Amino acid sequence: MKKIELLSPAGNLEKLKIAIDYGADAVYGGVSHFSLRIRSSKEFDYDSFKEGIEYTHKRGKKVYCTINGFPFNSQIKLYEKHIKKMAALKPDAFIVSTPGVIKLCKDIAPEIDIHLSTQANVMNYLDAKVYYELGVKRIIVAREISLKDAKEIKKKIPELELEVFVHGSMCFAYSGRCLISTLQSGRVPNRGSCANDCRFPYVLYAKNPETNTLFKIEEVEGEGTYIMNAKDLNLASYVDKIIESKAIDSIKIEGRTKSPYYTAITTKVYRMAIDDYYANRFNPKIYQEELNTTKHRGFSDAYLFQRPYEKNSTQKLDSSISQGTHQVAAQICEDGDYFLTKDKICQQDELEIVLPNEDLKPCENELGKIYKKDDKWFIKIYKIVTESNKELECIHSGNQNRVKLPCKLPKFSFLRRKIKKES
């Protein structure tokens, strides 16, 4: 049986490796301004992206290369050069947004599959058929689509692969077609440099043009002025229904610019949800508890199962501040012998260990103890000793000294603590 694909974000080489190690079947990322995530893509250059592709292919997984910006005439020659360079790295597909770039990719690298970006806003089988006839193998459908409409596309064009977003930030505008950032700061969302203006608080005024009178509109207590701040997408509880629809070939996690911990947890949870479904043990409560450990703006199930006009709970109006039940305290280095501090850690602290797999053995020595409790792994820190053998009582966030572990942990594991609620 062919399982649905899990596709995770790869904002840089480290996050690519984390996504693969935590269970992604494929990752997506890119190099340069031709990707819609400039901030993220700057963290990849051609050499590191090549290394990422080799790392992924060695593990039998796939890499989809983002070339999904919207080119000006002056950039077309640059696009041609970029496509040639990326094709030489042998990714498994290009993700593109426009018919012109589809043709360019087909002319330059006909051997590489084309995936159509969600920015193309495909909502129906007529548009899907046009792109399919242009040579597109997969369409990442518009985020506003319903599962019912996705099923209809699949019914009309069964050979066409469909991909849907299941987790991550939601855009206030229609599938990313936003100009607010352009108007306010000159940063163009559809060219990869969105300033996230929809996350800002706004004060509203009403003006009478006849009298030139200006009134400030007072906000209702507790409702706030974050009038465009969308909640984050979370469809982990619906993975079973998505699979059962038989319309979707791949589920996609948004978040190339988000943290390594976010990449790890979201990938691990959706991997678990997929595998649990096929093993007849699907359990949404577990998935939601784990996803709630990440920073988020509140969660919404968005539009796949309900139309936009049927929902009134997709925005977080009181604040754009992220929330989560846990704080990441440390990230395990790639050699597995040390950790780097992300939040203050002191001697005698007990921290939960988040692992890419559960293959771990207890241990104890003068540095600390690793043990299992209630089906979770923990570490108790006895001594904080840096790589240069300096002993500290506490180590603070931002300290780049590597700290010795009592015994080796899997690379890209994390240490975290539950955030205590204020009474």
Image (tube, rainbow, N blue to C red):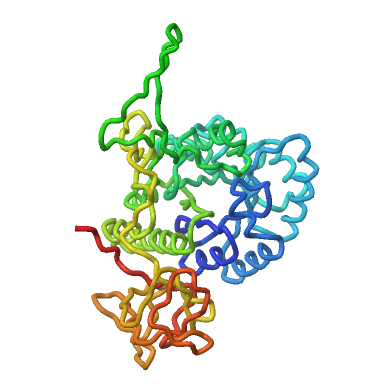
Q: Measured from the top left, where is residue 322 in percent x and y? A: 38, 51
Q: Viewed as shown, does residue 199 lie left or right of 310?
A: right
Q: Is residue 97 visible?
A: yes
Q: Is residue 356 visible?
A: no
Residue 391: name its quadrant.
bottom left
Q: Residue 410 or 135: which is nearer the viewer?
A: 410
Q: Residue at x 44, y 69 (%)?
A: 397
Count of all numbered marks drawn on residues in the image: 0
Q: Residue at x 59, y 67 (%)?
A: 56
Q: Measured from the top left, where is residue 71 in percent x and y? A: 70, 38
* In the rendered image, the vertical position of residue 406 relative to residue 417, given as above or below: below
* In the rendered image, the vertical position of residue 342 relative to residue 199, given as above or below: below
Q: Viewed as shown, does residue 312 lie left or right of 116?
A: left
Residue 49: name its quadrant.
bottom right
Q: Viewed as shown, does residue 130 lie left or right of 235?
A: right
* In the rendered image, the vertical position of residue 81 relative to residue 397, given as above or below: above
Q: Measured from the top left, where is residue 1 in percent x and y? A: 44, 60
Q: Residue at x 50, y 32 (%)?
A: 124
Q: Measured from the top left, where is residue 289 in percent x and y? A: 29, 59
Q: Residue at x 34, y 44 (%)?
A: 300
Q: Residue 42 or 186: which is nearer the viewer?
A: 186
